[in-house]
Structures are given as structure tokens and as C-alpha cells.
């Protein structure tokens, strides 16, 4: 087992827990659709985090390019995975009561959710640089601008309850991220 594989074992567990939490929340919604008020903006952000976690796993394959693993780099990647786990857990409470309004839950926890999401974007820039100067340069100016803009918009989202803003931001970041993934990461190796 090389160092990349060794590092990714623990990271895999954390990311797996994030996916499990999101999928369990979606299953619980599906099991009681008539009793629970479903918030569509909440579902947009659930889908965003679900795709983010899945895409992140794909993108992290490039960490095999790291020539020398330090304890600091290990802790950084581990922390990055923890951020994704926290984002996942902030979207669903530990127990989904049948009378829970997921829209209200989302807006009540938006400060934490978007705070960690903004942190995710900052860490993503560092992570991309960790994969090497050439890799980072190949991502281009579009990557730097959209990642920074997304982080700033997360700071705005922390403060506003405006559903129009959250709809536009949520759909835009989800669609852009999906577009970016298919344009940039068609194959690995």
C-alpha cells in the first residue's frame, strides 16, 4: 500500500459516513412524504452536497501526484473530508420528526451550513495547489474566480433568508459544479 492509499483509507470512511447521512435523510423523507413538509430549496442543497461529496472523491484521486506526504498534508486532507461530513450532517437532524419543517430547519442552520461551505471553497483552493503548481495552473482563472465567488456568496447566504437568493444560488452552484466536473474531469489516470 502506498502512502496515497494509506491516507485515503480513513478519508474514505469519513466520506462514506457523509454519503450515508445524506442518503438516510433522503430515504426518511421518501418514507413519509405526506406527513413531512418537504422544502424544495433544502433538497437542492442536499443534492448539491451529495454531488459535491461524490465529485470530491473523484477529484481527490489527483492527490496521488503528491510526491511526499507529510503529517500536515495528511491532516489537511483529513480535515477536508471532515468539512464534507459536517456539511452533510448540517442538512438533516439526527432524528427526522414527522412534523419537521425542513425549510425552517435549513434556514435555522444556514449560518453553520454556509460557513462550512465557505470554508470548503477556501480549502478547495489550497487542496488544488497541494496537487501541484502545474495542476493548479491547468485549472485556469475560471476555477479561481468561481471558487472565490462561491465562497463570498456563501457568506451572503449565511445572513439572508431570502428564498429567491437561496434558490438562484443553490441551483447555480449545483449546475455550475456539475458542468465543471464533466468539462474538467472526464477521465482519470
Image: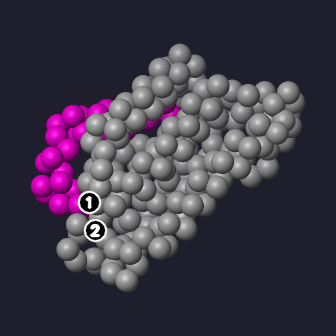
Instruction: Determine whether, in the image, residue 175 is placed left or right of residue 107.
Output: left
Q: Quadrant of the C terminus?
A: bottom left
Task: From the top left corner, tell me how far across and down residue 48 is, in percent.
Answer: 51, 38
Q: Residue at x 17, y 37 (%)?
A: 141
Q: Distance between the residues labelled 2 and 1?
A: 10 Å
Mark 2 is surrounded, within 10 Å at the Cα level, by few (under 14), some (14 to 19) or many (20 or more) other residues, namely some
Residue 15 magenta: no
Residue situated in front as seen by the camera: 17 or 109: 17
**Stretch of the chain drawn in magenta:** 129-158
Q: In which quarter of the image is residue 32?
A: top right
Mark 2 or mark 1, earlier in chain: 2
Whether residue 126 is visible here, answered yes or no, is no
Task: From the top left corner, tell me how far across and down residue 134 is, in percent.
Answer: 12, 55
Q: Which residue is drawn at 34% across and 38% down?
A: 182
Q: Secondary structure beneath disc 2?
A: helix
Which mark, residue 64?
2
Dot 2 and dot 1 residues touching (CB under 8 Å): no
Residue wearing tag 1 = 189
Whether residue 5 is visible here, answered yes or no, is yes
Amino acid at each position: 500500500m502506498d502512502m496515497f492509499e494509506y491516507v485515503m483509507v480513513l478519508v474514505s470512511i469519513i466520506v462514506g459516513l457523509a454519503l450515508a447521512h445524506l442518503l438516510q435523510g433522503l430515504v426518511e423523507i421518501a418514507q413519509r412524504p405526506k406527513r413531512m413538509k418537504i422544502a424544495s430549496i433544502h433538497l437542492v442543497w442536499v443534492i448539491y452536497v451529495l454531488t459535491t461529496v461524490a465529485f470530491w472523491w473523484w477529484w481527490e484521486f489527483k492527490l496521488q501526484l503528491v510526491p511526499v506526504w507529510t503529517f500536515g498534508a495528511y491532516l489537511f486532507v483529513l480535515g477536508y473530508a471532515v468539512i464534507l461530513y459536517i456539511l452533510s450532517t448540517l442538512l438533516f437532524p439526527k432524528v427526522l420528526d414527522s412534523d419537521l419543517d425542513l425549510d425552517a430547519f435549513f434556514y435555522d442552520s444556514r449560518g453553520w451550513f454556509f460557513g462550512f461551505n465557505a470554508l470548503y471553497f477556501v480549502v478547495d483552493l489550497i487542496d488544488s495547489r497541494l496537487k501541484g503548481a502545474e495542476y493548479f495552473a491547468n485549472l485556469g482563472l475560471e476555477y479561481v474566480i468561481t471558487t472565490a465567488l462561491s465562497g463570498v456568496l456563501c457568506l451572503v447566504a449565511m445572513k439572508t433568508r431570502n428564498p429567491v437568493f437561496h434558490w438562484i444560488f443553490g441551483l447555480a452552484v449545483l449546475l455550475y459544479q456539475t458542468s465543471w466536473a464533466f468539462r474538467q474531469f472526464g477521465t482519470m489516470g
